[in-house]
Image: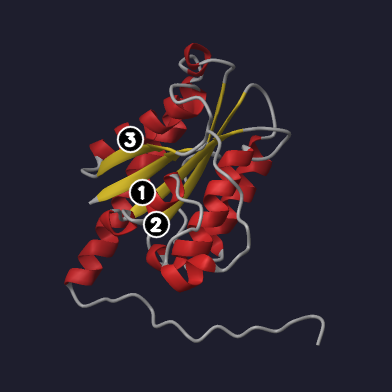
Amino acid sequence: MKVLLVNGSPHKEGCTCAALREVAKGLAEGGVDSEIFQAGSTTKGCLGCGYCRKTGKCITDDCVNEALARLEEFDGLVIGSPVHYAAADGAATSFMDRLFYAGGGKLRFKVGAAVASARRAGTTATIDQLLKYFTINNMPVVSSNYWPMVHGNSPAEVAQDIEGLQTMRVLGRNMAWLIKCIKLGEENGVSAPALEDKIYTNFVR
């Protein structure tokens, strides 16, 4: 059992990474492995070209395709992002747009969670934004004992946010528990719900 921890920050060793490492501790305590995947840098936005619908990968060959090729290795996904103007980082948003557009089918029924880091505010809006990827894609969402956010302007300041770090660890343990529950169910004949063909109703007809 393994979880992909996506660092949507342009800073590989910054505040978001510090939060994800704490999630990793909680996962490890629950007996689940994890891997931090660096996504936030110069990830390009979706071109809306439809190439991925035919090939299963994005026409822009970067870290998104790297992640797409490995999704079947993971039982869960955590996206972490810094707050930029009360929203997720632009590169993190582009990464998630393209990952879910090209690989949503590989993510269905895997567990998901989102975490945000900020100096001060905008975290809840960022978390709300990021959770929408999961809730449109048949993915169980994992919660913690508080909204999953850390505060600080540097990793050293994040280390002082002991409540935020606890929230990350609890999130990791909760995710490990849910993954194991799902695995146990599968081993005992409880399969994922059957999918209906999607019904589309356009507002303009």
Residue 124 image offset from top left, x and y in percent: 65, 40
Q: Secondary structure at mark 2?
A: strand
**Mark 3 is on which residue type?**
Ala
- Residue at image location 45% in from the left, 50% down from the top: 61
- Alpha carbons under labels 3 and 2: distance apart: 15 Å
Residue 195 image offset from top left, x and y in percent: 44, 82
Coloring scheme used: secondary structure
Q: Please tell me whether mark 3 or mark 1 is closer to you in this view.
A: 3
Residue 6 image offset from top left, x and y in percent: 43, 41
Residue 119 appears in the picture as rendered: yes
Q: Which mark is residue 111?
A: 2
Residue 139 appears in the picture as rendered: no
Q: Are marks 1 and 2 in contact (CB under 8 Å)?
A: yes
**Mark 1 is on which residue type?**
Met
- Residue at image location 56% in from the left, 40% down from the top: 147
**Mark 2 is on which residue type?**
Val
Q: Which residue was labeled with disc 3?
A: 24
In front: 70, or 86? 70
Q: State whether residue 177 is above or below residue 51.
A: above
- Please report whichever mark, 3 or 2, sits nearer to the chain's N-terminal start: 3
Q: Which residue was labeled with disc 1?
A: 175
| Quadrant position of the C terminus in the picture | bottom right
Q: Secondary structure at mark 3?
A: helix
Q: Residue furthest left?
A: 187
- Please report whichever mark, 1 or 2, sits nearer to the chain's N-terminal start: 2
- Residue at image location 47% in from the left, 56% down from the top: 141
Residue 63 image offset from top left, x and y in percent: 43, 44
Q: Secondary structure at mark 1?
A: helix
Q: Residue furthest right?
A: 204
- Characterize the local packing of mark 2: few (<14), some (14-19) or many (20 or more) Cα atoms within 10 angstroms: many
- Alpha carbons under labels 3 and 1: distance apart: 10 Å
